Amino acid sequence: MIHLRDAWRDILARRWALAPSLAPYGELLARWAAYAPPAQGLSWSAERCRETWGRGVPLAAEARPPLDAAHLEDLLGDAMEAVAALDPARAPALQRLAGAWDAGALGPQALLPRREGIGDGSIEAASRLDAAAVAFLAYATLRPVLEAWLAPTRPHFADAHWGRGVCPFCGAPPGFVDVIEGGHRRLACHFCGGAWSFAKLRCPLCGVEGTTDLQRLQAEGEDAGYVIAGCRACHAYVKELDRRERWNGGPPLLEDWGSPHLDVVARREGLLKPLPALLDLAAR
């Protein structure tokens, strides 16, 4: 996590005009860097990982991540404080969430990605918190532990077949897209830091294929190389960065956080983001 904090400084230097509004992310990254993940990662063999991927199943769907409520309490608490500071109207719902967590009625398993979406719905039911805020709290809380736990399985993915629009490691929807050599698309996961190749002419969020429903808003000037990749079928979007043009770009998660002005453009087009950043939760 220290590498993310260092890369964030580079992004702030490039986005100096946005630096004041981006300050809350620095505090979150500092907490991630200070987090001590479990000592042991997922020890599955390459064969077992590839067999699971061959069935179209993310690893975390069959291997239970080591999530301890007490160990993650500070991460969740800091993320909730950041949301409450940004939008005080969510404070009562966040307080209900904190109460249910402290009472043991809710735990970190409720934050995990699932086939139906982020979490199992119990957080929304107990707190009446909106789904967008729950999605941000989920990856803001789980990213350090999931990244460390799944790290040993990354090399096993080199020859694996995976054509789905969810992370092969943790099952989350993509949070960003990198365009790399040859114009190939590589999806990036905000939950665990995973990455995987994906078809050019297919929506990674709903799977619709062809050019009819795909919508691309190309940035210009200082933001050349960035694209808002939307879908008219599901009305959702992710941001893309052409790494051939922006060779000095930062990690996908930080590029997402560091370009909130592009999210404003996407919202004006009526597009929604499956994994909101903190600033996407600002009261509007």
Image (cartoon, grey):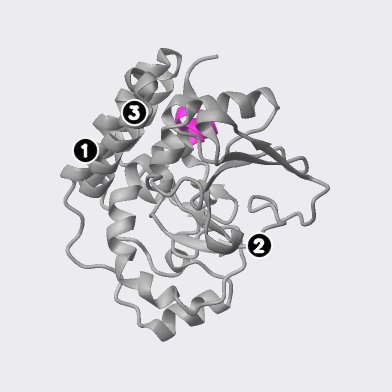
SS at circle 1: helix
Relative depth, front residue between 234 and 78: 234
> Is disc 1 surrounded by few (<14), some (14 to 19) or many (20+) residues within 10 Å?
some
Residue 147 is situated, as x and y percent measured from the top left of the image, at: 32, 57
Quadrant of the frame with the C terminus: top right
Q: Main secondary structure of the magenta part?
A: helix
In the picture of the structure, the residue carrying the numbered disc 1 is: 31
Indicate left or right for 24 with 124 as reference: left
The residue sitting at 23% across, 42% down in the picture is 6
Q: Amino acid at mark 1?
A: Arg
SS at circle 3: helix
Tag shown at residue 216: none
The CA distance from mark 2 to mark 3 is 36 Å
Tag shown at residue 199: 2
The residue sitting at 63% across, 33% down in the picture is 272
Of badges 1 and 2, nearer the viewer stands 2
Q: Amino acid at mark 2?
A: Ala
Q: Amino acid at mark 3?
A: Met
In the picture of the structure, the residue carrying the numbered disc 3 is: 80
Residue 105 is situated, as x and y percent measured from the top left of the image, at: 36, 41
The CA distance from mark 3 to mark 1 is 13 Å
Q: Is residue 180 above or below residue 152?
A: above
Q: How many marks?
A: 3
Residue 215 on the magenta span? no
